[in-house]
Amino acid sequence: MLPYGRQDIQKEDIDSVISVLESDYLTQGPIVPKFEEAICEYAGASFGVTANSATSCLHIACMALDLSKGDILWTSPITFVASSNCALYCDATVDFVDIDPVSFNICPIELKNKLEKASLSGELPKILVAVHMAGQSPEMKEIFNLSKEYGFKIIEDASHAIGGSYLNSKIGNCRFSDVTIFSFHPVKIITTLEGGIALTNCKDLASKMSILRTHGVTRDHNMMENHSHGDWYYEQIDLGYNYRMTDLQAALGISQLTRIDSYIEKRHEIASIYNNELSLVPLDIPIQHPDTYSSFHLYIIQLDLSKLNKSHQEIFQLLRKNGLGVNLHYIPVHLHPYYQKLGFKKGDFPKSEFYYKRSISIPIFPRMSHDDINFVISTLKEVIN
Ligand SMILES: *Cc1c(COP(=O)(O)O)cnc(C)c1O
């Protein structure tokens, strides 16, 4: 089965991991800060705090932004559950803003309308998590302007989007947000196995997040409440977690990062072949906003069901049966049983639900051969037409 995404591990990646295994430090050595610096430099951010997953990064970012009971976090329903679970970890409330059906990202007009209503009812969000669906940036400038008007903070969940750009600058520079998060899970653009990073230009946020990922403990004398008892001394000043990334993982990340631009180029090459070859099949190809340069983490087709005599589910199953490891990103978060128990109902976010009824993620990853690409195209044509 040809998967929808796959990591690329080369000899130099393996060598760099082995050299850490043979060194003095496996976990908290010099490599994690090196990786953080390398990502900051690549993405154009001032500070980077790695963690054992992007999910952990979302959690500590929410904590550092003081999200707590009584606060509200908004995000898109078309995302992985981690984008909204982070609010629930902080005892805050979640609500969603429906998507723009063309970009699959939060719709700035829906957002503006919902903010106007929330402002009247006193239910404004404290944080908006702006998801970069499939690797394409949301309209961050519009969202940023609304954040100034209505006073909310912005976390970019760019788990899909390292290597992409918005308004000609790299995702991760936090020009329009407080924190930007990347995931390094193996299906994402580059991998550290599990792992993630929270980027910010605010020193205070970076310092809070780095303490929260290490039990709430500090060794920085300027942050301590008491005088040092001696060289061994550290203080717990907050309740944090053990969310650290290891040196082993960071070494893999540094090695992977050297190939990121070639990965993104290859993903664009595949996407443009799909765009051309699928134009006559009754489906919608993913349209790109002119301000964005996607990382193309995912290539999502949308079936034109009115022109087809098979259902979405039938086509999905036939594709799998014929060897295409297609997937569906995502089940709208508010439709999950856990979220339904929080009070969300079918019909709450109709554009997201319509998206869900006809979308399919088809294979796209840097190591795809031309035979693989042709296999995807011919199988799609055969099954759909
Ligand atoms: C993968 C993903 C996450 C979680 O990333 P992990 O590193 O697996 O915790 C969060 N949000 C989105 C949009 C993702 O795709």
Image: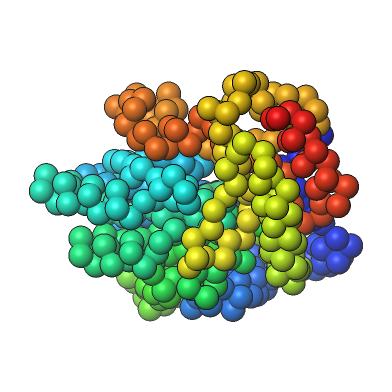
What residue is at 69 percent from the left and 23 percent from the top? 317
What residue is at 48 percent from the left and 51 percent from the top? 103
Q: Quadrant of the C terminus?
A: top right
Q: Could you say which quadrant of the image residue 42 lies in?
A: bottom right
Left or right: where does residue 155 sit relative to residue 314?
left
Q: Residue 18: x percent and y percent? A: 85, 62
Left or right: where does residue 108 sit relative to residue 276?
left
What residue is at 49 percent from the left and 78 percent from the top? 46
Which of 63 and 273 lies nearest the eye of the viewer?
A: 273
Which of 342 and 96 lies nearest the eye of the viewer?
A: 96
Q: Could you say which quadrant of the image residue 149 lies in?
A: bottom left
Left or right: where does residue 367 sit relative to residue 159?
right
In the image, is residue 232 above or below residue 366? below
In the image, is residue 203 above or below residue 18? below
- Residue 62 in view here: yes
Left or right: where does residue 182 sit relative to residue 314?
left
Q: Residue 296: x percent and y percent? A: 63, 56
- Residue 230 in view here: no
Q: Residue 223: x percent and y percent? A: 37, 73
Q: Could you say which quadrant of the image residue 84 lies in?
A: top left
Q: What is the basis of the colouring in this image?
A: rainbow
Q: Quadrant of the N terminus?
A: top right
Q: Residue 80: x percent and y percent? A: 51, 42
What residue is at 33 percent from the left and 64 percent from the top? 142
